[in-house]
Image (spheres, rainbow, N blue to C red):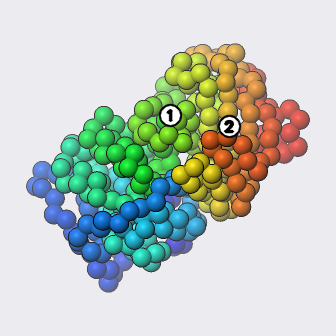
């Protein structure tokens, strides 16, 4: 299995010979925690940064950067509903990337886990936090409006780095598709923007560089442009924002963001930056979406983008949705 495949698929193969430190859970707790490394908390000062991974098994440069930002401290993976073998495998794959005080994986199984003082201490002591792939509805259900949400936002406000892949990236923006009922595919969303599976969340994590932004992953691979345009249209239609931006990351690709908002694309695919500042023309229950004039900037691997200026080394074009059909007039490469 390729390195870092845990960001996309949670394998169950145990890895023998890894020295692990287990933190005993109270009898009533359902969460699991596996720590590999020193038991004592690190007191180093990490460096701020955001690592946005589009999912997929090949994310080596992204993990290396998130690991480096920990500055030798404690690296924490947050996930949900995992077997012990996944926790072992995750720790074992991160450990060789760079020198760290510890690598640990904390897996939640219930909303009650988010009030456990031991869980909060683990999060508070982490220098770098990575949100694993899986199901973002678990993260929203278990963490939003709980002490864990407060701890995560305190981590960010303290200038500590965060990153996420797939579902873990989906929760990093001010707005997110929370997948509370199930996932949604582009044709279905475009045909009915208010269908019961178009479920959105907001005000979970407070990352200033991603304010007013929604994210999406596996973008081209899973043809998610149409549904992202629906999410943007819904946010505007429902008056959640007067302007909406989106960062959409392709599979096996990542956006590495610095403290000043300057970012670089690494990996195999592109990152798309979308923006709209006007309400859709038609966005209603059981009516195909009409939403014109969405600006797009497509950034290739190795190129840069500045989030604060919302511009960079990009191919620029405009998208429109007319009666559920996504169009890119004048674009030489189609809608993607």
Task: Let me know if residue 202 appears in the view.
Answer: yes
Q: Is residue 30 above or below residue 210?
A: below
Task: Give the labeled residue for mark 1.
Answer: 175
**Residue 304 figure quarter:** bottom right
**Residue 333 image position (x, y, % from top left):** 84, 45
Q: CA distance from mark 1 to mark 2?
A: 14 Å
Q: Residue at x 33, y 59 (%)?
A: 126
Between residue 116 and residue 136, name the one nearer to us. Answer: 116
Q: Residue at x 30, y 67 (%)?
A: 42
Badge 1 vs badge 2, beta-carbon distance below 8 Å: no
**Residue 293 figure quarter:** top right
What secondary structure is found at the residue carrying circle 2?
Answer: strand
**Residue 155 image position (x, y, % from top left):** 36, 50
**Residue 261 image position (x, y, % from top left):** 59, 48
Q: Taking 23 as reference, is 227 left or right?
A: right
Q: Residue at x 24, y 50 (%)?
A: 120
Q: Taking 334 as reference, is 93 left or right?
A: left
**Residue 336 image position (x, y, % from top left):** 76, 44
Between residue 174 and residue 54, name the one nearer to us. Answer: 174
Q: Is residue 72 above or below residue 146?
A: below
For label 2, the crowd category at 10 Å Cα-Cα, with few meaning under 14, some 14 to 19 and many 20 or more, is: many
Between residue 280 and residue 277, name the one nearer to us. Answer: 277
Task: Let me know if residue 179 appears in the view.
Answer: no
What secondary structure is found at the residue carrying circle 1?
Answer: strand
Q: Which mark is residue 215?
A: none
For label 1, the crowd category at 10 Å Cα-Cα, with few meaning under 14, some 14 to 19 and many 20 or more, is: many
Earlier residue among tags 1 and 2:
1
Q: Taking 45 as reference, is 328 left or right?
A: right
Between residue 176 and residue 324, name the one nearer to us. Answer: 176
Q: Which mark is residue 274?
A: 2
């Amino acid at each position: 299995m390729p390195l870092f495949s845990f960001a996309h698929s949670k394998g169950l193969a145990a890895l023998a010979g890894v020295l692990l430190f287990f933190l005993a859970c109270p009898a009533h707790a359902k969460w699991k925690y596996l720590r590999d490394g020193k038991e004592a908390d690190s007191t180093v000062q990490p460096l701020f940064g955001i690592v946005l991974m589009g999912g997929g098994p090949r994310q080596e440069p992204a993990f290396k950067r998130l690991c480096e930002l920990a500055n030798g401290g404690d690296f924490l993976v947050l996930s949900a509903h995992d077997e012990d073998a996944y926790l072992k495998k995750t720790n074992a794959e991160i450990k060789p990337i760079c020198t760290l005080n510890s690598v640990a994986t904390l897996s939640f199984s219930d909303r009650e886990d988010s009030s456990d003082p031991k869980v909060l201490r683990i999060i508070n002591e982490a220098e770098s936090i990575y949100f694993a792939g899986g199901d973002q509805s678990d993260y929203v259900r278990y963490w939003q409006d709980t002490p864990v949400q407060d701890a995560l936002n305190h981590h960010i406000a303290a200038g500590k780095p965060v990153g996420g892949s797939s579902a873990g990236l989906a929760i990093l923006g001010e707005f997110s598709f929370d997948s509370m009922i199930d996932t949604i595919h582009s044709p279905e969303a475009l045909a009915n923007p208010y269908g019961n599976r178009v479920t959105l969340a907001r005000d979970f994590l407070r990352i200033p560089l991603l304010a007013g932004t929604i994210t999406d992953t596996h973008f081209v691979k899973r043809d998610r442009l149409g549904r992202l345009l629906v999410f943007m249209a819904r946010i505007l239609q429902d008056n959640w924002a007067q302007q909406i931006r989106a960062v959409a990351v392709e599979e096996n690709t990542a956006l590495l963001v610095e403290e000043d908002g300057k970012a670089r694309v690494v990996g195999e695919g592109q990152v798309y930056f979308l923006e709209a500042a006007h309400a859709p023309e038609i966005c209603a229950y059981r009516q195909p979406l009409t939403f014109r004039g969405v600006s797009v900037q497509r950034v290739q691997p190795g190129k840069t983008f500045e989030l604060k200026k919302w511009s960079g080394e990009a191919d620029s074009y405009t998208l429109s949705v007319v009666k559920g059909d996504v169009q890119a007039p004048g674009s030489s490469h189609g809608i993607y």
